[in-house]
Image (spheres, rainbow, N blue to C red):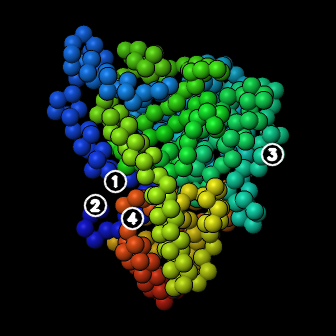
């Protein structure tokens, strides 16, 4: 459980490890602890079997950031040159590697998303995406579900547009795996990144799906060492993490429909209560009643006239955020909400809520009360958004 007295609503940043995942991992620390590369003895062979049981066209990594870098740099640098397409609201773990590729000669198009007054706020326009594709486009990278506003991109349609032109597609599915259906064949992706700690698994273990049949994808290694992972990623395999990630994914798939329905109800309850107490709170991203466009566990809204950071400081019992954990120490406004079309005050007045399978009704009710009290105190003090 969370630290006593703390209500944890920052599940886009990380999730609590499920007790059943911990139980699955324990033998790998006590009994099945050998190096999976040490296949000359029984313990090493047993460790390798655990890894192979979890594998299917997968490269195991340290997390989604490494997976994104391996996909983007590994594929593009093997091609040598060309044009790349992405979206302005991607995570920095995608935008930063693309910027590095730009520095060595690749051209990058960063597409905007539809604004808050459109029918599909936060989603990329498919016609605009099609127009961005060029004769020398070699790779498109589009996030499946956004980590700040929960927007679910029309990835299958994007992949179809790319497949017709022989363009590979990478997807950062970090926020999507375990929360919505993610079938690489149905989507048509060639490369897909994710990490265990976003769906109640351990930190330090992620994966990259690499298409191995049909249009086979080849990568240039970004970490060289002992030739692990068919030469695509050197380094001793994290057997404990891999076992934990596999178990966490099993549990997520078993309970996904039930968990999603429950989290959507709690998310909507929180939004209704906050608005009942504080008045209209503009929503950032897709509508809450559009399950195919927004994650069930995501709420991102504005608190007009107030500073989001001040609201959090005034509610120390709440663990939540104003955006990505990777930019929490930055004074710059969220690039995601800025790309959505919000001005500086609107961005600074926004808070992100991330629910999980462990979130309770009591926590939601308490959170709305704490935030309402904090907002009322700030209004009484005349505290407004930062200039």
Mark positioned earlier in the residue sequence (1 or 2): 2
Query: For mark 4, does the 10 Å Cα neighbourhood hold few (<14), some (14 to 19), or many (20 or more) residues?
Result: some
**In this figure, which residue is indicated by the disc labeled 3?**
128
72 or 28: nearer the viewer? 28
User: Can you name the residue that lies furthest to the left here?
Assistant: 30
- The Cα–Cα distance between marks 1 and 3, rounded to whole angstroms, is 39 Å
- Quadrant including the N terminus: bottom left
As helix, strand or loop, the secondary structure at mark 1 comes to: loop
Q: Residue at x 56, y 42 (%)?
A: 182
**In this figure, which residue is indicated by the disc labeled 4?**
359
Q: How many marks?
A: 4
- Quadrant including the C terminus: bottom right
**In this figure, which residue is indicated by the disc labeled 1?**
16
- The Cα–Cα distance between marks 2 and 3, rounded to whole angstroms, is 45 Å
Q: Position of residue 334 (x, y in %)?
A: 58, 57
- The Cα–Cα distance between marks 1 and 2, rounded to whole angstroms, is 8 Å
Q: Position of residue 264 (x, y in %)?
A: 52, 64
Asked if 372 appears above or below 71 in the picture, the reply is: below
Q: Residue 237 lies in what quarter of the image?
A: top left
Q: Position of residue 99 (x, y in %)?
A: 62, 36
């Amino acid at each position: 459980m969370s630290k006593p007295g703390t209500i944890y609503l920052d599940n886009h940043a990380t999730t609590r490890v499920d007790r059943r995942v911990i139980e699955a991992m324990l033998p790998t620390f006590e009994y099945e602890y050998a190096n999976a590369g040490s296949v000359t003895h029984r313990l090493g062979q047993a460790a390798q079997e655990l890894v192979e049981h979890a594998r299917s066209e997968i490269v195991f990594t340290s997390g989604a950031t490494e997976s994104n870098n391996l996909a983007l740099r590994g594929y593009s640098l093997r091609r040598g040159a060309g044009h790349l397409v992405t979206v302005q609201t991607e995570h920095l773990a995608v935008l930063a590697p693309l910027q590095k590729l730009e520095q060595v000669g690749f051209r990058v198009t960063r597409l905007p998303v539809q604004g808050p007054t459109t029918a599909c706020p936060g989603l990329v326009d498919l016609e605009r995406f099609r127009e961005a594709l060029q004769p020398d486009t070699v790779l498109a990278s589009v996030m499946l579900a956004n980590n700040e506003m929960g927007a679910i991109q029309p990835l299958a349609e994007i992949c179809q547009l790319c497949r017709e032109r022989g363009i590979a597609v990478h997807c950062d599915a970090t926020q999507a795996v375990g929360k919505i259906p993610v079938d690489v064949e149905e989507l048509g992706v060639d490369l897909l990144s994710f990490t265990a700690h976003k769906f109640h698994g351990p930190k330090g273990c992620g994966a990259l799906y690499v298409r191995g049949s049909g249009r086979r994808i080849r990568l240039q290694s970004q970490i060289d060492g002992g030739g692990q992972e068919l030469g695509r990623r050197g380094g001793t395999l994290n057997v404990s993490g891999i076992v934990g990630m596999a178990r966490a994914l099993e549990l997520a798939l078993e309970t996904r429909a039930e968990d999603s329905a429950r989290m959507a109800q709690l998310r909507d309850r929180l939004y209704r209560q906050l608005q009942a107490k504080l008045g209209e709170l503009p929503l950032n991203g897709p509508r809450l009643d559009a399950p195919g466009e927004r994650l069930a566990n995501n709420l991102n809204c504005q608190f007009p006239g107030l500073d989001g950071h001040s609201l959090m400081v005034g509610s120390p019992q709440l663990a939540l955020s104003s955006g990505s954990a990777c930019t929490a120490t930055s004074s710059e406004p969220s690039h995601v909400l800025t790309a959505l079309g919000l001005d500086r005050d609107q961005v600074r007045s926004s808070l992100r809520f991330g629910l999980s399978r462990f979130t309770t009704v009591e926590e939601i009710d308490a959170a709305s009360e704490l935030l309402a009290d904090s907002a009322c105190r700030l209004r009484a003090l005349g505290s407004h958004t930062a200039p």
